């Protein structure tokens, strides 16, 4: 940054020096005085205010992004037996191949070509079958989609959402009950 001095026709260069800006002219250091010190102080105050505001926003975003609890499939079975409900977020084709008894299928993602795309109506569809205070176990095929879906549900205001780690693959590998097809 360069500043032209009005009283002299000298060019001042401000260079970092221990986190302070120190003017340099003709190879010699000049002390920072008067208005330059006030500008530096005022700039530091507004920077501090900006940092405080930015940190408050980041803190709110972190608090709003809840991380769901994940439990192993055997614990999920115990929770289901205790009255919690099972939300299967796999595709309809995956669900039709086999699922836990009593599971409700609402896909979190759909297959599109060789990839997957998020279901834009997921939260609204969940709201048809579940209340915000229902205790919900969320499962998918391997555990990735269910973790994302559970986080989205928590962010949408659902209060009792638990992710089933390992998904339906772990459920079937452990020989847990299957729905009659």
Image (tube, rainbow, N blue to C red):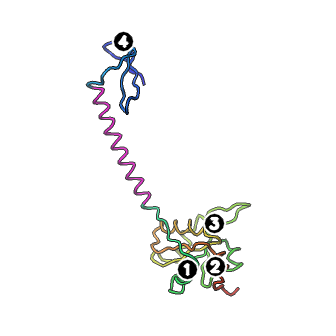
Who comes first in sequence, dot 4 or dot 1? 4
Q: Is residue 55 magenta?
A: yes
* 79 versus 38 height, above or below: below
Q: Could you give the CA–CA distance between mark 2 and mark 3, rounded to whole angstroms?
A: 20 Å
Q: Could you give the CA–CA distance between mark 3 and mark 1, rounded to whole angstroms?
A: 22 Å
- Please give the residue where the numbered disc 1 appears in the rendered image: 76
* 62 versus 99 height, above or below: above
Q: Residue at x 65, y 72 (%)?
A: 141
The residue furthest left is 34
* Label pair 4/1, CB-CB below 8 angstroms: no
4 or 2: mark nearer the eye? 2
Q: Nearer the viewer, residue 90 or 13?
A: 13
2 or 3: mark nearer the eye? 2
* Label pair 4/2, CB-CB below 8 angstroms: no
Q: Could you give the CA–CA distance between mark 3 and mark 4, rounded to whole angstroms?
A: 67 Å
Q: Determine crowd level at label 3: few under 14, some 14-19, many 20+ residues with C-alpha closer than 10 A.
A: some
- Helix, strand or loop at label 3? It is strand
* Label pair 1/2, CB-CB below 8 angstroms: yes
Q: Could you give the CA–CA distance between mark 1 and mark 2, rounded to whole angstroms?
A: 9 Å
Question: Which numbered marker is on residue 9?
Answer: 4
* Label pair 3/1, CB-CB below 8 angstroms: no
Who comes first in sequence, dot 2 or dot 3? 3
Residue 54 in the image: state x and y as whole percent.
Answer: 39, 48
Who comes first in sequence, dot 1 or dot 2? 1
Q: Nearer the viewer, residue 4 or 123?
A: 4
Question: Which numbered marker is on residue 109?
Answer: 3
- For the N terminus, the image quarter is top left
* 32 versus 59 height, above or below: above
- Helix, strand or loop at label 1? It is helix
Q: Residue at x 53, y 72 (%)?
A: 70
Magenta-drawn segment:
35-62
Q: Could you give the CA–CA distance between mark 4 and mark 2, rounded to whole angstroms?
A: 80 Å
């Amino acid at each position: 940054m360069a500043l032209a001095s009005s009283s002299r026709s000298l060019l001042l260069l401000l260079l970092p020096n221990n986190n302070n800006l120190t003017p340099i002219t003709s190879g010699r250091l000049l002390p920072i005085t008067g208005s330059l010190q006030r500008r530096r102080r005022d700039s530091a105050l507004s920077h501090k205010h900006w940092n405080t505001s930015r940190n408050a926003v980041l803190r709110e975003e972190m608090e709003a992004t809840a991380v769901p609890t994940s439990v192993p499939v055997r614990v999920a079975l115990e929770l289901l037996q205790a009255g919690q409900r099972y939300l299967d977020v796999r595709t309809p084709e995956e669900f039709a191949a086999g699922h836990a008894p009593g599971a409700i299928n609402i896909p979190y993602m759909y297959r599109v070509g060789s990839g997957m795309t998020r279901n834009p109506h997921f939260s609204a569809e969940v709201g048809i079958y579940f209340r915000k205070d229902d205790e919900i176990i969320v499962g998918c095929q391997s555990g990735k989609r269910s973790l994302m879906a559970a986080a989205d549900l928590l962010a949408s205001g659902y209060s009792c959402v638990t992710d089933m780690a390992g998904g339906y693959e772990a459920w079937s590998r452990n020989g847990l009950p299957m729905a009659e097809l």
